[in-house]
Image: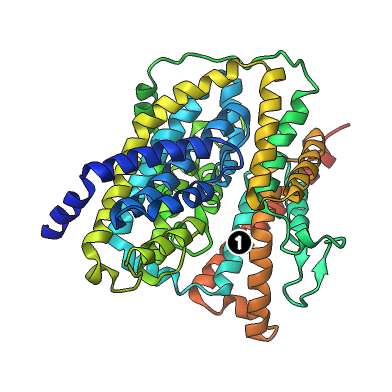
Amino acid sequence: MEQLVEALSLVLRVDVLITILLSAIFGLFVGSVPGLTATMSVALLVPITFFLDPVPAVAAIATASATAIFAGDIPGALLRIPGTPASAAYVDEAYALTKQGKSEVALGTSLITASLGGLIGVLLLAVFAQQLAAFAVKFSSVEYFWLGCLGLTAAVAVSSASLSRGALSLLIGLLISTVGIDIATGHPRFTFGQMDLLDGVSFVPAMIGMFALSQVLRSVTVDLDVKVPVAKIGSLSKQMIGTVRLYWKNILRSSVLGNLLGALPGAGADIAAWVAFSLSKRFSKTPEKFGTGHPEGIADAGSANNAAVAGAWTPALVFGIPGDTVTAIAIGVMMLKGITPSPRVFETDGTLVLAIFLAFALANLIMIPLGMIAIRLARHALSVPTRILMPVILIFCIVGSYAVDNTIFSVWIMLALGVLAYLMEENDIPIAPAILGIVLGKVIEKNFLITMLKTQGDVLGFFDRPVAAVLGVITLALWSFLIIRALRGVTVKQELPS
């Protein structure tokens, strides 16, 4: 109790509270701009943390990352352009609500579930940090391989298109992920002599092109003066209360899941959102509503990705292993401020760590009023004619792509994949599975090769660890289910009279 009082005294200082407030506003702004990810918002704050004490410095990073993850839902719901990769899993669901004139339903659900998911994640972080980190650090290449395969399977399973089209999209994404240096031989693959492709296709330009630029290309084929109808739903707070009452079990389940996935180094909020969205559809009593604008999937994925943000701090604090890119930056800042991540961090810097938890919780609370203001302001973007809005979005696409590594080549990547995504959607091939294929392709290939080397080519080695065996069986069972469902669908079509 004495340590808690000391931690509160550190957090409830004027300078810390002002830092949290300004960081929240900054995170909302950066996250809502396509291409300027949560990682970028944190990276931009690093120079400022040099002049801050340890608690406000780390609090600034935690706050900006949490609010930026939510803010990515704003352009996703309004314009079908996810501001951050974590918003990509449910962008179609949110945008479908906007097209029905229910943009505040989508964003209200995102806001309250993001806040609650973050709070639950922080609570789990404070209570089970050491246990979760000890579990996560035991994961080897085998578990990561099956986890990646399970994520890819989830992308196909939740696709609103047919199984064959979803699988084709996934294969396109996996093909793009093979660009770069071959992990096994060290030779370049599909680089066509371009040095910029040796590290592969950068994910942020790919996401911007496939979601944002494709939307711009689709828009120029219709009436450029068209406006999306904006419906006034009334009290946003009532909408959020209704969401909690209706989906509290989903929020709790996905928050725990997101926290666990966030504690796995490299998993991150985007993978947590995909897995939670997939499970949401599987456990839903109305799975047929998914893809038509159903808040249930948004509630699950929205709570999971913010809980994962908190979960990523578990291995960062206890073992110095970054759970994602944000915590990788946070580790550097903590060490700069004299906080050394280790299993004994709760003994050596217990008060400071507890203060960080409290600042994280405060950031998720302050997200609600600031998020409501952001939603009210952002909804006016829908009243702008397409001929004005789309050129502005195109400028953001170019700036966001260039800002990744300050090269024009990233802009060309964005343009090329934007055209590809436009052609895919024109032929009813979904984009989301391709995006996840790009994200997880290299992870799966790397862990597959490492495992094959360790087992000397023995396939049974993929099942010789308990957790790996469970993940493997679940993945193979899901593959079998999808294949059987697809074959039955073909059989039924053949038996129908022409």
In this view, 351 is above or below 465: above
Give coordinates of residue 213: x percent, y percent: 73, 35
| Residue 418 in view in this figure | yes
In this view, 471 is above or below 355: below
On-image quarter of the C terminus: top right
**For the residue marked with disc 1, what is the amino acid?**
Gly
Q: Residue furthest bottom?
A: 456
217 horizontally vs 371: left or right: right
Q: Residues within 10 Å of mark 1 (few under 14, many from 20)?
A: many
In this view, 229 is above or below 257: above
In this view, 488 is above or below 390: below
Residue drawn at point x = 56 percent, y = 18 percent: 101
Residue drawn at point x = 41 percent, y = 25 percent: 373
Give coordinates of residue 255: x percent, y percent: 40, 48
Residue 316 figure quarter: bottom left
Give coordinates of residue 314: x percent, y percent: 38, 62
On-image quarter of the N terminus: bottom left
Q: Residue furthest left?
A: 2
90 horizontally vs 361: left or right: right
> Front-most of 73 and 160?
73
Residue drawn at point x = 53 percent, y = 18 percent: 380
Provide the secondary structure element on which disc 1 rests.
Answer: helix
Q: Number of labelled discs?
A: 1
Give the residue number, with chain letter if any, for mark 1. 148
Residue 160 figure quarter: top right
| Residue 487 in view in this figure | no
> Front-most of 217 and 229?
217
Figure coloring: rainbow
Give coordinates of residue 264: x percent, y percent: 47, 63
